[in-house]
Image (tube, coloured by chain):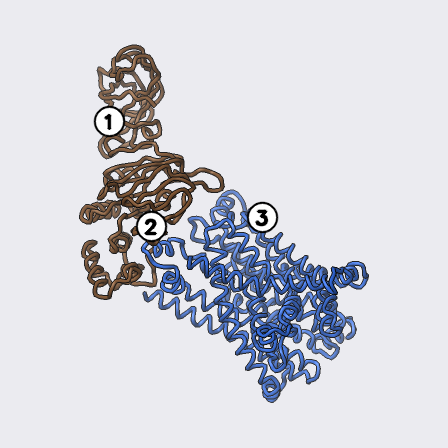
Chain colours: A brown, B blue
Amino acid sequence: MNALEVKHLIKCFDGKEVVSDISFNVEKGQLLALLGPSGCGKTTTLRMIAGLDTQNDGEIWIEGVLASHGSKSLIPQRLRHIGMVFQDLALWPHMTVCENIEFGLKAKGLAKTERQKKIDAVLTKVKMQKYANEYPSRLSGGQQQLIAIARAIVTEPKLLLMDEPLSNIDVKLREEVRQEIRRIQHETQITTVYVTHDQEDAFLLANKVVVMNAGKVEQIGNTEEIYSFPKSLFVANFVGESNVIEVKIVGKDKVSTPWGEFACNTKGHEKESAFLFFRPHQARIEKGGQFDGVIVNRNFVIDGYMYRISTSGGEIKVQDLAKYEVGQSVKFSIKKMEVLFF
Amino acid sequence: MQKKLTLGFIFALFVCVTFLPIVWMFGNSIYGDGGFSFVYYKDIFLTQKYIKVISNSLILASITALLSSFVGIPAGFFLAKTNLPFKGFFKMCFFIPLIIPSYTTGIAWANLLGKTGFLNNILSQYMLFSPESVSNFIYSIYGASFVLSINLFPVIMLITEYALKNLNPRLEESGLVTGSVFRVLRQITLPLITPAIISSMMIVFVLSLSEFGIPSLLQVNVLTTQIFTQFSAFYNEKAATAIALPLIAITFVVMTLEQVYLQGKSFEILGRRGSNSTIKYDVKWLSVVGVIFCTLVLIGCVIIPLSTLIFSAQTISAYHDAILLAKRGITNSVLFGSIGATFLTFMGFFLGYLSEKIQSRLRNSTALFIWLFFAVPATVLGIGLIKLCNRPEGIFQFIYGSLWIVIIGYVARFSPLSSRIMANYLKQIPHSMEEAGTVIGASWYRILGNILLPLQSHGLIATWLISFMFCIGEMGTTILVYPPGHETLPITLFTVMANSPANIVSALSIIIVVMTLLPVGVFLAISKYLIKSQIAQ
C-alpha cells in the first residue's frame, strides 16, 4: 500500500493554475523529493498534502484513506497525523526545546510520563539530549534544524513533510544536517516528502524524485533515471550540467548533427527529429577527436575544468582534467550519448 | 471551526457596536410616522448656514493637515535621516501632544492667547497686534487649526520617519554613487516617500474633521459642534443625524481614498529588502538646523502648553480642589478606562487577526471595513448609540442607564485603532508558527493559548495601555452617552470650565495629562524589562 497518493491535483490562485493535474505516490518508508525551481508549485503541493491549503480539484490519499477530494477537505489538517518541518523551522521562541517537542504530545492528550518518555527518546534520536532546556534562540542553525525534525517526528506521524529545511544554512553545515536527516529517516522509516530546489539534496536523500516545472510534473523516477534518461528538455537542462543538441535521424542508427553525420543508437527510430543528449563529463578533449571547436571559457571545478567550446552547432560544455587555454582550437569526442525524443 | 466561530462572533460584535448604531441612526432620520421623509436633509443641503458649517469643517481640516505637515515632515526627516543630537529625547517629547487629550492643549493656548493671556499681553505690548485680534485669532478656525496641528503633527512625523527609515538604502545608495546628497533627497528619497506623506495628511484631515473637543472649546462652528448643539441644546436628534451625514460621507470617502491610494504603492517600494542600515545625511549644518527646528517645535508644542497649564494652576491647593471636584470623575475614568481597555485589547486581538492573518480574499476588505470606523466622528457615534440603546426593553435599558453605554462607546470608537495596533504586532509572527501547531494536531484554542497569545504579550500590553490612554481622554462620545453619576474626568473638566476658576481648570487639565502619560511610562518600563529578559534568554 502506498503511504501517500496524490491524484490529478489542481490548485489555482487568482484564477491562475499554479499546480496543474499532478499525480504521484510514495511507498511506505520511502523518501520522495519534490524537485523544481522556485515558483514551480512544489511547496503548494506540500501544503495541500498537509491540509494547510485546499486544492481546487484532485484527490489526496494518506495510508489508503481519502484525505481530500475535489475542493473538499475530508480529514482536517490536525487529524491527518502529519509532521512538518517548515522552511523557517517555526520553532516557538518562547518555549524551550522540551516544550516545543512536548506541544504536539499534549495536543494528543498523552500523560505526563509518556510524554517525557517520548521526548527523551526523540532527543536521543537526534542527539540533542543536553539541549532539552535551552531556548531555540540559544541553538545554532543546525541544532535548530534537528529540533524542528524532532518536534515533527515525536508524534510518530504517518507522513513527514519537509519544506526546504536546508535552504537557510551554509554549505558545510548543510552537508552535516543532510547526513542526519538521512540517518533519522532511515532509522525511523517515516514516509517523507521533501521539497527542495537543490538537486544535491534531492539526489543524496531521495529514493524517488518528482521533478516539477510550472506546476506540472516533468518526470518521476529514481535518481539514476532522472539523471541519465531525462524525459523532457526541462529535466535535461535542470538536472545537472548537460548538452542538448537538436539532431535529425537520417537512417537506422544514423543521425545528422550540426557537426556532420555519425552512427548512434536511435532506439529503432529511423526518420524523426530528436535531441542528442550528453553530460559534460561524457565528452573529452583529445587530439584525435571527432569534432572541432574553440574554447571560449574555462572554469575550475573540483574535478578538473569546465570548458565552453564554440562549435559549428553552437556552444557545448565539456569537462576535462587537462588544462587548455581560452581561444585554443581543440578537437573533442563524445564518449557516451543518448538520443532523446521529447 | 473553533477559529471561524470565534472570529465570526467577534466580527459580528464589532458590527453591532459600530455599524449598527450608525445605520440605525440614519434609518431613523429618514423614517418616521409610517413613511420616509428627507426634510432634515433638505434643510441641511439647501440652507446657507449649513453650507457655511460644512465649509468651515473642510477649511479647519485642510489647514490642520497643511500646518501639521509643515512641522511633521521636517521633524520626521531630522529624526530619520540626520545625526541629530538628543534624538531619543526629542522623539519622546514629540509624542506628548499626540497622547494628551487635544482639549488640554486648547485650554493652554486659550489661556495664553485669550484677552488676559500672558502671550496676548506680550504680543499687544511689543508688536502691533491688538489684544482683541490676538484673542479673535485663537477663537477662530485658524486658531483651532493651529492648536489641532500641535496635537496632530506627530502623526505625520511618525509616518514620515517610518517611511524614511524603511526606505531600501540601496535605492538611495545607487543615487549617491552619481549625485549629491540633496539631489538624491529631491529626486529619489522624497518621491519615494510621497505616498506615505500624502496618506498621513489624509489621516490628519479626517481626524481634524471629526474632532469635537477643540472646536467646541474655541467656539468654532463646525459639523461636530453643530451635531452636539442640535442634539443636546435643541433636542433635535433628526437634524443632528442629518448634519452627521456629510461629515461621515467625507470621512469615509477620504479614508477609502487613502487606503486605495496606498494599496500596492508605498509598502512595495518601502519594503526593506536585505538591507540593514538607513542612509544618513551626515552634514553638520543640517544637524544644527535640526536641533534648532526640533527645539522650537518642542517649545511651541510641548513646553509652552504644559508650563502654561502648570503656571495657570498657580497653587497646590488648586490641585487639591480639582481632585475634590473631580473625585468621582477620576474614579470613573480609571474604572471605565480599565474595563474599556480590556475589551478593546480582546476585540483588537481578534479583529487584528482578521485583518492580518486570515487566508482569504476578503482579508483586505475586512481590514478596510474595520479601519473605516476609526473615522466615525465621536459625536455621531454617541447619537447612534443613544438611538440604538434608548428603549424600554430590558437589556437596552440596563445598558443605557449604566457604565456599559460608556464602555460600548469606547469599544466602538477605538476598536479599529486597537485592531490596527494588534495587526501590526501579529504581522511580525510568521504564519508557519501557527501552522506548525496545526499540523501537529492542536486545536485553534490551544494554539491561541500556547502560541499566539504568549508570542503577543508585548503587543497585548501595548494595546491595553494605548487603549487605556485613549479611553481616559475620550470626550466626544462620552459627553453624549454618559448616564447621571457616571461622568468621566473629561466630562468633569468640561463642566468645570463653565463654572470654576481658570486655575482649577488648569489643575484638572494637568491631572488628565498625567493620567494619560502614566500608562506610556508604564509601557516603556515594561518594554525595557521584556527586551532585557528576551536578551537574557
Query: Gap between marks 3 and 2, in whole Å?
Result: 39 Å
Name the residue nearer the viewer: B232 or A97: B232
Q: Is residue B125 something one can see in this rendering?
A: yes
Q: Are marks 1 and 2 in contact (CB under 8 Å)?
A: no
Q: Quadrant of residue A139?
A: bottom left
User: Where does label 2 land, which residue?
Assistant: A86
Q: Amino acid at mark 3?
A: Pro
Q: Amino acid at mark 2?
A: Phe
Q: Position of residue A200 (x, y in %)?
A: 27, 38
Give the left or right position of residue B7, taking residue A333 as reference.
Answer: right
For the residues beneath circles 3 and 2, the answer to whether they share a chain is no
How many C-alpha atoms fall within 10 Å of the one at disc 3: few (<14), some, or many (≥20)?
A: few
Question: Is B421 rendered above or below residue B183?
Answer: below
Q: Quadrant of the C terminus of chain B?
A: bottom left
User: Where does label 3 land, which residue?
Assistant: B191
- Which numbered disc, 3 or 1, marks the residue closer to the eye? 1
Chain of the residue on which disc 3 is drawn = B
| Residue drawn at (33%, 46%) of the image | A163
Q: Position of residue B375 (x, y in %)?
A: 62, 61
Question: Is B284 rendered above or below residue A33?
Answer: below
Q: Amino acid at mark 1?
A: His
Instruction: Look at the numbered disc 3 and give the secondary structure of its residue.
Output: helix
Name the residue nearer the viewer: A7 or B451: A7
How many C-alpha atoms fall within 10 Å of the one at disc 1: few (<14), some, or many (≥20)?
A: some
User: Where does label 1 land, which residue?
Assistant: A281
Query: Gap between marks 3 and 1, in whole Å?
Result: 53 Å
Q: Earlier in the sequence, mark 1 or mark 2?
A: 2
Give the left or right position of residue B5, taking residue B478 as reference.
Answer: left
